[in-house]
Image (tube, helix red, strand yellow):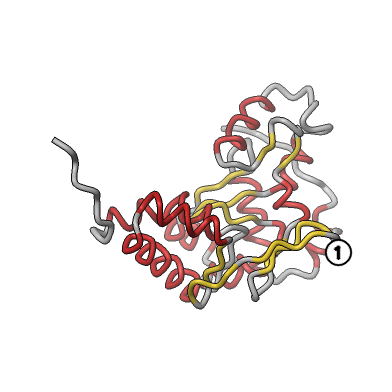
Amino acid sequence: MSKRFIDTGLFDDDWFMDLSKDAKLLWVYFITKCDHAGILKLNEKLCKVQTDIKDLNLIIKQLGNRLVTVSEHLFFIPKYIDFQYPGFPNSKVRQQQSAVDILVKYGLFDKEKLTLNIQLDNCYEHDNGNVIVNDNETVKKEKYAEFIFLLPEEYEKLINQHGEKNTKTLIEILNNYKGSKGVKYKSDYLTILNWVIDRAKKDGKYIEKPKMI
């Protein structure tokens, strides 16, 4: 059984004290069940059995930006990295390099700048589709469905790679998911790449290009 550090002052933390009982339980669940890179693939059915939390989506919202949604059922805890690897990315902890490799895999770590992806720290998404990168720069996204915002170039990439009909299908799948679950993503485009395409293919909704003989 693996072991990890936990802050003995957790229950004295103002943010933690303001959480509901279920949110406190879920936070402890996440920081003890995630992998050594702070990433957890959530099995909702198992989590509900183990915690007796009825409405996971509601409680996850209470954790706010302490929890980053990477893709469907996949979450990342940014603060986990700072706590488990003091001085990251220059920590002396042996498992750090393996953790970095996992973060790079999911696009959560910039290898050139040696920092966590800027979107995790300084970027937030408005309902109107604007993404604020910093105080001086605003990148405008276009609305392609009720809950879907993409940069024009992102939409063009989807069209070029998957065709117009498949792109509409991918947007519809993600739009329905976000609307029913009440979740937000840092990037709808990356979310489509991470799991929506696979979901469409699995459900038989993706039209494959005919193979050349």
Quarter containing the N terminus: top right
Q: Is residue 32 above or below residue 47?
A: above
Q: Secondary structure at mark 1?
A: helix
Residue nearer the viewer, 145 or 101: 145
Residue nearer the viewer, 74 or 134: 134
Q: Mark 1 packing: few (<14 Cα in 10 Å), some, or many (20+)? A: few
In the rendered structure, the answer to whether residue 17 lies left or right of residue 54 reads: right
- Residue, disc 1: 14
User: In the figure, residue 136 lies in which quadrant?
Assistant: bottom right
Under mark 1, the amino acid is Asp
Q: Is residue 118 above or below residue 151?
A: above
Quarter containing the C terminus: top left
Q: Is residue 61 above or below residue 103?
A: below
Q: Residue at x 76, y 34 (%)?
A: 113
Q: Position of residue 48 (x, y in %)?
A: 48, 63
Q: Residue at x 65, y 34 (%)?
A: 3
In the image as oriented, which residue stretches furthest toward the bottom?
146
In the rendered structure, the answer to whether residue 40 lies left or right of residue 158 reads: right
In the image as oriented, which residue stretches furthest toward the left?
213
Q: Is residue 100 above or below residue 74?
A: above
Examine the rendering and report whether any part of residue 63 can be seen: no
Examine the rendering and report whether any part of residue 186 can be seen: yes
Q: Position of residue 25 (x, y in %)?
A: 65, 61
In the rendered structure, the answer to whether residue 201 lies left or right of residue 107 reads: left
Q: Residue at x 66, y 48 (%)?
A: 31
